[in-house]
Amino acid sequence: MQDAATRVDFYVLESTSRPERLNFVCRLTETAYKAGNTVYLLAASSSEAVELNKLLWTFRDDGFVPHNLSGDSNQASAPIMIGHEQPTSKEYGLIINLANPVPADFDRFQRIAEIIDASATVRQSGRQRFTQYRAAGIEPDTHKIGGN
């Protein structure tokens, strides 16, 4: 059932700051885009998806990350899609997960990035997802990210 090629990375931030967490997501998305990846940003809510959509336009003055918000009436194909619903297509090489559950059928994707900040709630749900990945036979990599 599980595709051995699925890679899961946990990015653990020292900060409890939600803006810092979302800014890190933007930087990670930009890095993935520049490396030629297609990305689905799985937001925890529709309001967080809208917030990420705005942030990707403004987080850096000298960069551009082509993206679309899932469900937009003008939705054209873009290498980065932002939504709060589980991705229905496996066309994305990387899922950046900000939501609580493990992405549905996660083993169909090449990579999943879990973004964990220092808040107790986010850490606890991250531990649960870490355990779920391990139970599926995946050993996630953990990257500790220091403050700015």
Image (spheres, rainbow, N blue to C red):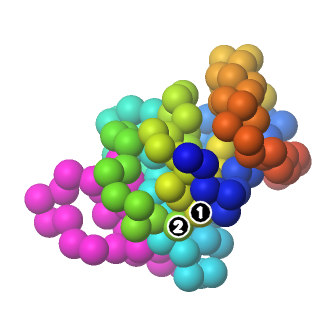
Magenta-span inclusion, residue 6: no
Q: Which mark is residue 54?
A: none
Magenta-drawn stretch, dominant element (helix, strand or loop): loop
Give the camera-side residue of 113 and 13: 113
User: Of the residues shown, which amino acid type is indicated by label 2?
Assistant: Gly
- In which quarter of the view is residue 98 placed? top right
Residue 61: tell me if it is visible: no
Q: Which region is colored magenta?
A: 55-83
Please give the residue where the numbered disc 2 appears in the rendered image: 93
Q: Say which residue appears at 64% left-offset and 72% top-offset.
A: 31
> What is the x, y in percent for residue 108?
50, 55
Residue at 61% in and 71% down: 32
Task: Say which residue appears at 52% left-offset and 29% top-offset.
Answer: 101
Residue 30 lies left or right of residue 126; in this view the side is left
Looking at the image, residue 64 sits to the left or right of residue 45; the answer is right
Name which quarter of the figure residue 61 lies in: bottom right
Is residue 71 visible in the rendered image? The answer is: yes
Q: Residues within 10 Å of mark 2 (few under 14, many from 20)?
A: some
Residue situated in front as seen by the camera: 20 or 141: 141
Mark 2 and mark 1 lie on one chain; the one further toward the N terminus is 2
Q: Any mark on residue 110, and which?
A: 1
Q: Residue 95 at x, y = what percent?
A: 53, 54
Quick check: 109 left or right of 82? right
Give me the C-alpha separation between circle 2 and circle 1.
5 Å
Secondary element at tag 2: loop
**Element under disc 1:** loop
**Residue drawn 55% across the image and 47% down it:** 1
Q: Are marks 2 and 1 in contact (CB under 8 Å)?
A: yes
